[in-house]
Image: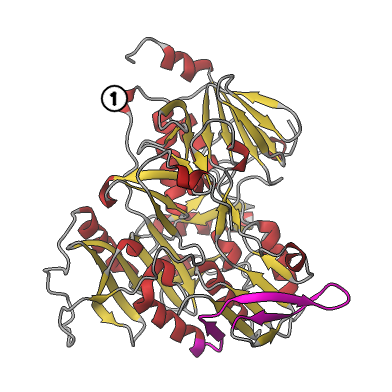
Amino acid sequence: MVRIAVDLNRCQGYAQCAFLAPETFAMHGEEALLYNPEVDEAHREKLLQAAAACPVQAILVDAVDVPAKAVSGGR
Amino acid sequence: MGGDGTLDRLKRKGRIVVVGASLAGLRAAETLRDKGFAGSLTLVGDEPYEPYDRPPLSKGVLLGKASADRTALPRLRNVDAKWRLGVAATGLDMGARRVRLADGDEVPYDRLLIATGVRARPWPHEGEGALDGVIVLRTRDDSAALSRMLAAGPRRVLVIGAGFTGSEIASACRERGHHVTVAERAAAPLVGALGGVVGAVAAELQREHGVDLRTGVMVTALDGDAAGRVRSAQLSDGSSVRADVVIVSLGATRNTEWLYGSGLGAGPRGIACDAGCRAFDIRGIVTDDIYAAGDVARCPHPLFGYQFLTLEHWGNAVAQAEIAAHNMLSESVDRVPHMEVPSFWSSQFGINIKSVGVPSMGTEILITQGSLESRRFVGVYGYQGRVIGAVGFDSARWLPFYQEQIEAAAPFPPEFSTVDRRTDGQRPVDADFPDPSVPTHGPTVTLSGYAPDDRRMTFVPAH
C-alpha cells in the first residue's frame, strides 16, 4: 500500500489530482478535496504523477517502505 | 561546528526521546535524522498505532471514502527509531533526565521533545458519558466506532458543540442521510474561532442542509434506557431530543497531567515554551534540553504581540516539530524562532473554509471580496488598526495574499481597493466574538497571559 497525506493548508483546489488520479482524489463541493490516505500499490505511478502535477505541491507520498516490525508494540 | 564539542557528541551518540507519536512526533523524528542526528532515537506513544493523520477521521472516514485504520502518515524518510507504542509516559524526572513509562520502564534522554497533544474533552457526567451510543471523536478508534454506529442506521444523531469538529460531523451525517440535531451553547456555530458575523453564515448553512440546529442552549443531561443505551438528551431550554447516537464535541484537553510535579511549566493550557519551542520550568526559566511541539505547546508569537498561543492546527504541529528538531541540534546563535502564521482549514456542507492569522484576536471584520449571501467570500479581521486574520469560504486562492497582509502588519481597514466593486463600501463591522471571560466550547486558538509561570493557569480544573 502507498500512503499519502495532503497538506490542505497549501491545497487551493486546482483539482489536478482529481483529474489524474480520480480513484484517490475527489473534489467535494467546488473547492474542498477528499482523498483516500492509503492507496493500492498499483496506483503508485498515477499518484506520483498527481503529486508532481499539483501546482502548490501539497501532496505528500510515502518516500520509504516501513518495515512492519519497526512499528510493532513493545520494546 | 563551533562550541565546545558537546553538540557534536550529541549528534553522534546522544539520546533523543520524543514523547507523542503523532504528526508532530513523526515529523520531528524525520527532521532530526535529516539534520544528521546519528544517535539513539526513541518515540513513545500511548496509542498502539504508528503515527496517523487525523483530519480524515472527521471527514472522509465518516463519508465512507476512507477507512479509520488506514490513515497512517506517509514516511518522508527512514527514522531508524525505537518505537514504544501502546505505552503512555507517566512521569518526568528533569534532574535525572528520565521519562517514566506506564509499564514501569524508564527511558533516559539527553534531549526530550514533548508532543503529547490533546484529547477530546469527555462528557462531564461520567455515568451518562458511559452510555452506549455516546462518543467523542479524536482518535482512529473513536472514528472507527462512530463509523460503525452510523452504519447501524441511527434514527437521530445529536452533536453537542458546534465547533469545527462538531460541524464537520454534522455535515457528514447529513450527507449520509441521517437526521441530525446540533446543540450549541453560543449563538451560532464556529463563533469561538470566527466570530458571530461568520458564525451566522455557518448557522444558515447547517439549517439549509437540514440540520436541526439549536443555539443558545446547553445539554443538561443524557438519559439511557434499561439496557444502558442512550435514548434522549435534556436541553437547558426545557426541551428534549431523542437520539440514539450522541457525539460530544466540546473541545480538547491538553495531555500535560503526566508532567505535574515534574517542575516543568505545564498546565491545562499546555507547556509554556519560548519562540524556539524550548520549554520553561515552573520558575519561568527556560530549559536547555526539553522542547515541546504541536497542540500541547504554548509559544509566544512575535506577530501577535508575543501572546502565548496554543494552536490545535495540523500545520502548526509540522512547523513546530521542525523548529524544535532544528533547535535541539543547534548552538544558541543558530536557533530559529517559530514565526509561521497560523492557518487551518475545515470542509463542511460543501464549503471549503480556510483561515490565516488569528481571527479570534480581531475586533472588527470587513468582507473584502464576495458576499456572505453567496457563501463565497473573504472576511478580514482587524485589531488595533492592523490586519490580524482572514477567513475564506470557497476562496482558498486568495488567502496567501491576506497572509502577506498579516505578516506585514498591513493597516485595517485595508487600503487596497478589492478586485470586485463593493456596493457596501469598505466599512468594517464588529466581528462579534463572545466575551472571552465567559467559557464556551474550546476555540481552536486559545490566548492566554504573558507570564510563563502564571499561577492562574497551573491548577485550573479541566472542566
Residue B42 is left or right of residue A16, and the answer is right
Between B166 and A54, the one lying in front of the other is B166
Between B332 and B446, the one lying in front of the other is B446
The structure residue drawn at horizontal position 59% and vertical position 67%, both measured from the top left corner, is: B249
Between B197 and A6, the one lying in front of the other is B197
The structure residue drawn at horizontal position 52% and vertical position 66%, both measured from the top left corner, is: B441
Q: Quadrant of the C terminus of chain B?
A: bottom right
Q: Quadrant of residue B193?
A: bottom left
**Residue B48 location (% of width, % of height):** 71, 45
Q: Is residue A74 above or below residue A45?
A: above
Residue B261 is left or right of residue B423, and the answer is right
Q: Which residues are magenta?
A: B207-236
Considering every residue shown, the one lying at the far top of the view is: B4
- Please state which amino acid type lies under the numbered disc 1: Val
- Is residue B453 visible from the viewing direction of this image? yes
Judging by the rendered image, the residue that carries numbered circle 1 is B333
Disc 1, SS = helix
Q: Is residue B90 above or below residue B203?
A: above
Find out whether residue B211 is within the magenta segment: yes
Give the crowd class for mark 1: few <14, some 14-19, many >=20 residues within 10 Å: few
Residue B119 is left or right of residue B435, and the answer is right
Q: Is residue B324 above or below residue B308?
A: above
Between B363 and B10, the one lying in front of the other is B363
